[in-house]
Amino acid sequence: MRHQRRGDVIVRLVFALAAGVVYQYAFAPYLIWPLAVPALAMIAWAVLGRGFWFGALSGALFGVGFWTGHIIWLTEYLGAVPWIALSAAMTAFCALGCAIGGFLTRRRLMRQTHPALIALVWAIVWTAREAVFSRMPYGGFAWGEAAHSQSNAPTIGLSSWLGLAGLTLALVFVSALPVTWMLSRRPVRRPLVVGVVLLVLGMLVPAWGAIVPAQGSVRIAAVQGNANAGLFSNAQPGEILANHLAAARQIMHDDFDVMVWPENAVDLDVLRNRQAHAQIEAFVDEMGRPLVLGSVTKRGDDFYNSVVLWMPKGMSAPAGLTDERDDGAAEPAVSGVDPTTTSGGPVQIYDKKHPVPFAEYMPDRWLFHPIAPDLVDLVPRGYTFGQRTGNFQIPSGDTANDAVNAGVLICFETGDSDLVHAAVAGGAQLLLAPTNNADFGQTAESAQQMAIARANAVAAARSLVNISTVSSSAVIAPDGAFIDRLPDFEPGTMVQDVPLQGSLAPGFFAGPVITWGSVAATVLMIVGEVVTRRRDRRLGQQITARSGRI
């Protein structure tokens, strides 16, 4: 196990592949979170100290073992091509990260650098790789990050102190520490004890929301219509809206402050279609409370994946309510409604800022159409990237303020840490996450998305209402506990008091620092390693030349 024999190359490669297979069982839908530690230890043992190219090969095998199983749900409706393409891309990113890890640790192990420093270098590189490729290319794919494997673990509380990036850093470090000690030919007992102590301490750190008392609450009704809202849905126009109206009418006269519907719950443009507009208006006016709903909207030549705050007639809009862009520029009034009046209607709208590439829009169509024309043609038009502020001001009778500030995230945006951070920075006291998982049927996709949303809720120290058209609908407390859940693929409703939080968790500040600090540190380490190797090479050549003259 100390890389003493050349014959163990195959064994290490087998371990790298097995590590990827084991790693996926730490994530949803399995959620066997302790398996993340041995899986991360196995890939560390295969890679550390072995150089760039062996690290790349080991990382590629790890990526194949993990990604091909973790995102198999892509084949549900779209077949094997998108699954193979995305698995290959994420595997390439794994290979690059492991290659850098092998490159940066080879000489450090040879020179007997302290094992804790080597484990830290490896953890920094892993964290940096996740940070970069969850954001690029095309907005990245924030899926399968190490911190997400801890969504139902006691260790998830650490994210409210260090952010999700900090939790990833800590998890990878603790997993690699015994390995680096072993590879450096030192007694293994000490790092095992240290690793166990650090892991236990992480498990004992509670979520920030469990430390700071809730600052009020808002009573929310959430509706899952169990509607066939998938890409290839054969539902008649208005059918999905009818499903949600039917489910919502069962609780419309209950005691709550606001009702929330999923993404695409209104399958007609609620701002332009008279029938849909009239139905929503009549329902909200009868209910007498605000409604947050998802609808595809068109303004000018642009289509948007939108969430709308609809007010009943006679209810005053919160003081200071504006409908503006993130850059402060004024937006045209939504559907001609003045939000400062009491006329009701759509007073605020949020357009999805991070549409999913290759699904909600097609990047570089000129490049990908010749490769897979049938698949590219499934996305004939793309959603425009939203620019509006994602913080809704929702009236509430249970708070001292005029309104509750709710940060809105649509579907996959719950995995975008930057958008979550922006919502909290905008004053969000809770998070609303309307989503539509119908495209993926009864696969693991919705469970994985729920785990990601749960992890981000704890990291942000905010309650989160995840409401879907079909599956994985739940109300989540700031400490990650489920306040309420709905059965999958059944119409249902939840009416719950949702805790509000105005304080900022330490992770709000530490998370971005660790995220971008790990990227900067990795770049600096690469530059330093290249410069050092060139300098040592020149010195070696000079010594050889002098020896020849002597």
Image (spheres, rainbow, N blue to C red):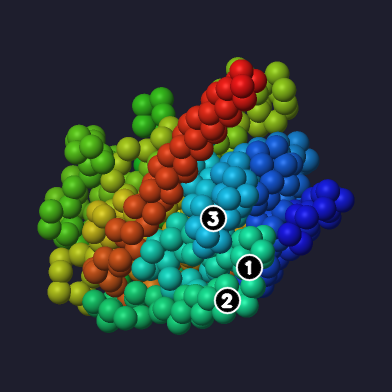
Q: Earlier in the sequence, mark 3 or mark 1?
A: 3
Location of mark 1 (residue): 186
Q: Residue at x 58, y 50 (%)?
A: 111
Q: Tell me the quadrant of the picture where the C terminus can be found.
A: top right
How many residues crowd around disc 1 within 10 Å: few (fewer than 14), some, or many (20 or more)? some
Q: Earlier in the sequence, mark 2 or mark 3?
A: 3
**234 or 445, nearer to the observer:** 445
Location of mark 3 (residue): 113
Q: Residue furthest front?
A: 550
Measured in 3D between alpha carbons, the distance from the residue under mark 2 to the one under mark 3, in whole angstroms, is 16 Å
The percent coordinates of residue 537 (x first, y second) are 57, 28
Disc 1 vs disc 2: Cβ atoms closer than 8 Å?
A: yes
Q: Nearer the viewer, mark 1 or mark 2?
A: 1
Q: Amino acid at mark 3?
A: Thr
Q: Tell me the quadrant of the picture where the N terminus can be found.
A: bottom right
Location of mark 2 (residue): 190
Instruction: Locate residue 293 relative to residue 11 in the image: left or right.
Output: left
**127 or 114, nearer to the observer:** 114
The percent coordinates of residue 245 (x first, y second) are 48, 62
Secondary structure beneath disc 3? loop
Q: Nearer the viewer, mark 2 or mark 3?
A: 3
Vertical order, 16 against 499 (above or below): above
The percent coordinates of residue 313 (x first, y second) are 23, 58
Secondary structure beneath disc 2? helix
